[in-house]
Image: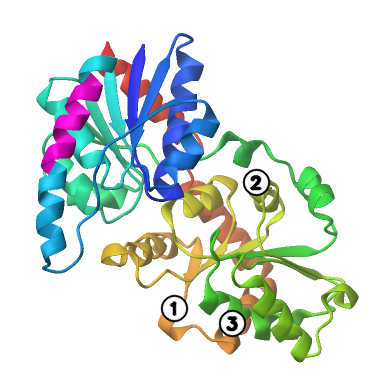
């Protein structure tokens, strides 16, 4: 069996693709994979390290305004369709799957024109522009949220799979996480992360939270700042007179390589509202405070977060409304209300789709047969 996978630009498009590939390989022993991306996206670094074949096409995204650059992009896109067609013809895939990003456009379009089974996976409630266009041509559309179905005109193509997550997110245990991260099992754990690059608004608001909770015997804070924000946050805390070592319940780190273990110990999470992060939170049934990134395309993070809020799994704070006092107030209200937290955890677990990758893999195999 031969698969072409395409997706790129951000980890939110790349890691679901890798998870889907691994799920298909669990079902089919003899499975050859080729990943098509760009030279400039994260995929050019990540995919070869995963051991998959990797080819690139010359394509770039459109600017969100009228410009000469967009005219040039149109010609590049046309050329990239022919590049994709050549790669596909040489590799002879049984199916082509796209997980988002502009690189998927020419790859999936070329495959569809060649009569090869095609599928796209949309992680967000509001579909991206590329997937909206491709929906007219592909055979199947896997969506992460039921609310996304209404955004596609041909509902017969759409199936609700949930968003793929790494297997280790589910397999990590609380005991393992406490030991690896050096945390106290007797304390309630709050995990704070604005993503791999950090989130300045969240980090700044956390100064007040650390001031409020430093030294508490029943609560511990695991704060992932992002590399660029770490020194500034540590410096601000020192200026406020907070010694994180003496406090005994605060861990601040620029990056967390063992996020699955952190999720395994989290009783509450303070997160952005990217689709992959939410999929991991709900797979573990973690109550959350969500601060959607306000500059995400079509404000899709807020739509993602509102789904969680409507289901009772999260409290949403708009980035524009976020302050240290507001975040402290919300955290205080949750940690002092065990029943509300328990209900949020149940609601979060109900939303979760830990078998999403397996569902997509089985659909892909059905399409080939």
- The vertical placement of 241 against 89, above or below, is below
Helix or strand or loop: what does disc 3 sit on?
helix
Seen in the picture, residue 152 relative to 166 is either above or below; the reply is: below
Marks 2 and 3 in Cβ contact (< 8 Å): no
Viewer-closest of 334 and 69: 69
Cα gap from disc 2 to disc 1, whole angstroms: 26 Å
Residue 338 seen in the figure: yes
Q: Is residue 247 left or right of residue 210?
A: right
| Residue that appears at 19% across and 31% down | 83
Horizontal side, residue 28 vs residue 66: left or right = right
Between the residue at mark 1 and the residue at mark 3, the CA separation in whole angstroms equals 10 Å
Closest to the observer, 43 or 282: 43
Give the answer, above or below, for where 51 lies relative to 181: above
Q: Which residue appears at 85% of the width and 79% of the height?
A: 215
Q: Is residue 157 visible?
A: no
Q: Residue beneath label 2, please? A: 260
Give the x, y percent position of residue 94.
28, 15
Residue range in magenta is 78-88
Kindly identify the residue that appears in the image at 55 percent across and 52 percent down: 281
Q: Is residue 306 above or below residue 119?
A: below
The image quarter containing residue 135 is top left
Q: Locate residue 86: give its quadrant.
A: top left
Residue 216 colored magenta?
no
Q: Position of residue 294 (x, y in %)?
A: 37, 73
Q: Report x, y in % for residue 316.
A: 46, 72
Label drawn at residue 319: 1
Q: Which residue is mark 3?
A: 205
On the rendered image, what quadrant is the C terminus found in?
top left
Q: CA distance from mark 2 to mark 3?
A: 25 Å
- Name the residue located 43 percent from the left edge and 49 percent from the top edge: 12
């Amino acid at each position: 069996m031969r698969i072409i996978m395409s997706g790129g630009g951000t980890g939110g498009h790349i890691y679901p693709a890798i998870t889907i590939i691994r799920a298909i390989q669990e079902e089919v022993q003899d499975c050859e994979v080729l990943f098509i991306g760009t030279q400039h996206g994260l995929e050019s670094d990540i995919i070869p390290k995963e051991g998959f074949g990797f080819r690139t096409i010359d394509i770039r995204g459109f600017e969100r305004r009228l410009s000469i650059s967009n005219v040039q992009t149109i010609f590049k896109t046309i050329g990239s369709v022919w590049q994709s067609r050549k790669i596909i013809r040489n590799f002879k895939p049984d199916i082509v799957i796209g997980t988002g990003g502009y690189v998927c456009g020419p790859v999936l379009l070329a495959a569809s024109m060649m009569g090869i089974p095609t599928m796209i996976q949309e992680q967000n409630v509001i579909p991206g522009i590329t997937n909206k266009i491709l929906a007219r041509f592909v055979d199947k559309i896997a969506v992460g949220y039921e609310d996304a179905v209404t955004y596609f005109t041909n509902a017969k193509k759409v199936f609700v799979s949930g968003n793929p997550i790494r297997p280790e997110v589910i397999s990590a245990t609380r005991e393992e996480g406490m030991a690896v991260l050096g945390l106290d099992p007797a304390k309630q754990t709050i995990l704070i992360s604005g993503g791999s690059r950090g989130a300045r608004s969240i980090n700044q608001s956390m100064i007040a939270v650390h001031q409020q909770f430093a030294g508490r015997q029943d609560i511990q804070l695991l704060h992932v700042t992002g590399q660029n924000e770490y020194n500034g946050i540590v410096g601000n805390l020192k200026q406020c007179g907070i010694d994180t070592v003496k406090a005994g319940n605060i861990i601040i780190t620029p990056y967390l390589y063992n996020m699955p273990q952190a999720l395994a110990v989290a009783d509450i999470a303070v997160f952005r509202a990217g689709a992959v992060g939410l999929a991991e939170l709900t797979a573990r049934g973690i109550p959350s405070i969500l601060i959607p990134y306000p500059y995400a395309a079509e404000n899709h993070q807020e739509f993602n977060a509102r789904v969680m809020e409507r289901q009772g799994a999260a409290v949403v704070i708009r980035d524009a409304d976020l302050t240290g006092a507001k975040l402290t107030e919300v955290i205080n209200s949750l940690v002092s209300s065990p029943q509300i937290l328990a209900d949020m955890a149940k609601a979060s677990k109900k939303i979760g789709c830990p078998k999403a990758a397996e569902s997509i893999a089985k659909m892909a195999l059905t399409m080939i047969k």
